[in-house]
Amino acid sequence: MSQQQQPIILRGHIDEVTSVYFEKSTSNLSSSSLFSGDLKGNFNIFNLETRRVKQSIPNHHNGCILGFYQDDHYLYSQGREGCIKRLDLNQINISSSSPSSSSLEWYYNSIFSFCKFAPCRIGSSLSFFVPCDKEQVMLLDCREKQTLDGYKSSLMIAPPVSQYSSLSAFGMLTGMVCIDHSQYLLCSYEGGVIVEFDVRKLSEPTFVLENFEKQENLEGEQPKFCNYRDLIGVRHIYDLHNAQDPIIAINYQSELDKIIIGASSTQIHVMDRANIPTNSSIDTNNNHSFTGEQTSYSFEMKSGGVNDISCYNMSGVASTSQMSRLMFAGCWDGSVRVFDLKRKKKLAVYKYHENAIRSLDFKENNKEILLAAGCKDSKISIWNVNFETKRK
């Protein structure tokens, strides 16, 4: 275990910080930045050099900000009210507290889910998987010409509940992450079940979401893919065998091919991704007696509850440091726990906050890693994860 270090503390929110996100690529912001959102939907941009807020947009969302994603100079944010907004970072006016005129928004539902969106690439187009009614997932295409208020995708994804009577109820969707170049989608449910959907057909030239909807809505006929099961397969289902311990956080470590699961218990589970031939998938038209499998191993914590998990997830891109083996967990007791997934060891416990950590993000900087933690106490802590710590 490493010695306790003193973090940098960023102050600029009144309400609890629900999302933090390091700037991932260059824009006209002139200095390294951290984006943050809070429970009331307020949005801040911090200058990491001065450690001050350089722009604030009050009420950017009507509900708490759940997540961010940067694509080139565009920043996408997700609000709990069921809306994704896009800001052009090159056109942000630092002296203004209003979004630029080039901002766009997409409303997809009003279920007030806490589940974070999952960005994915459908061909060359950026899309998002977003939570929908109960356990369902919806594909939202965020191209400029599809920006109508109330826009809804025709493609809905749901777990094969009726085919798996041996499993406990799936329950509400709690987490999503796209893996393996957006070819697969991991969805976690509060019943302790994870479904790995095969979404490779969405990237085939025969599938264009816009045409899929237009044919169905304007011609009054069924499109070529008339059922999501013609497009979406189920590669595998993972069962934690503990419906009383709902899954809260999920992530995927690409280099080690591990699924990491955080819940309300004192354990963080690390599961091997199923080794299945590329062209294989579960036939959801037939009933199955599924018993699931045990986790590969678990980390034990002194106190229970994990709200967020951050780790390396870039398929096909080698990490420039030992980040490929690290995993960070933002916990209910206000601590950030650091683990070495390769050696299966606890490395450090970073403790500053007294309230729950709500969001984590990291940024690699040469041989160092900056780790940001947004907390319920309205503060953000920035930790320097140094090379010496990672070698232990």
Image (cartoon, rainbow, N blue to C red):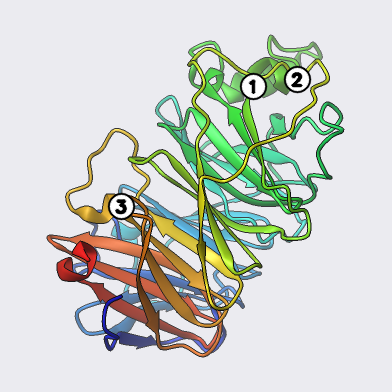
Cα distance in 3D space between marks 1 and 2: 8 Å
**Residue 237, percent from left and from top:** 66, 33
Q: Earlier in the sequence, mark 2 or mark 3?
A: 2
| Residue at point 21%, 84% (across, down) | 50
Q: Give the labeled residue for mark 3.
A: 325
Q: Is residue 52 left or right of residue 300?
A: left
Q: Earlier in the sequence, mark 1 or mark 2?
A: 1
**Three-letter code for the amino acid on which mark 2 is drawn:** Thr
**Three-letter code for the amino acid on which mark 1 is drawn:** Gly
Q: Give the labeled residue for mark 1.
A: 233
| Residue at point 55%, 82% (across, down) | 333
Q: Is residue 6 left or right of residue 287?
A: left
Q: Give the labeled residue for mark 2.
A: 284
Which corner quadrant holds the N terminus? bottom left
**Three-letter code for the amino acid on which mark 3 is drawn:** Arg
Q: Is residue 386 left or right of residue 255?
A: left
Image depth: mark 2 or mark 3 in front: 3
Regarding residue 148, the answer to whether it shows in the image is no
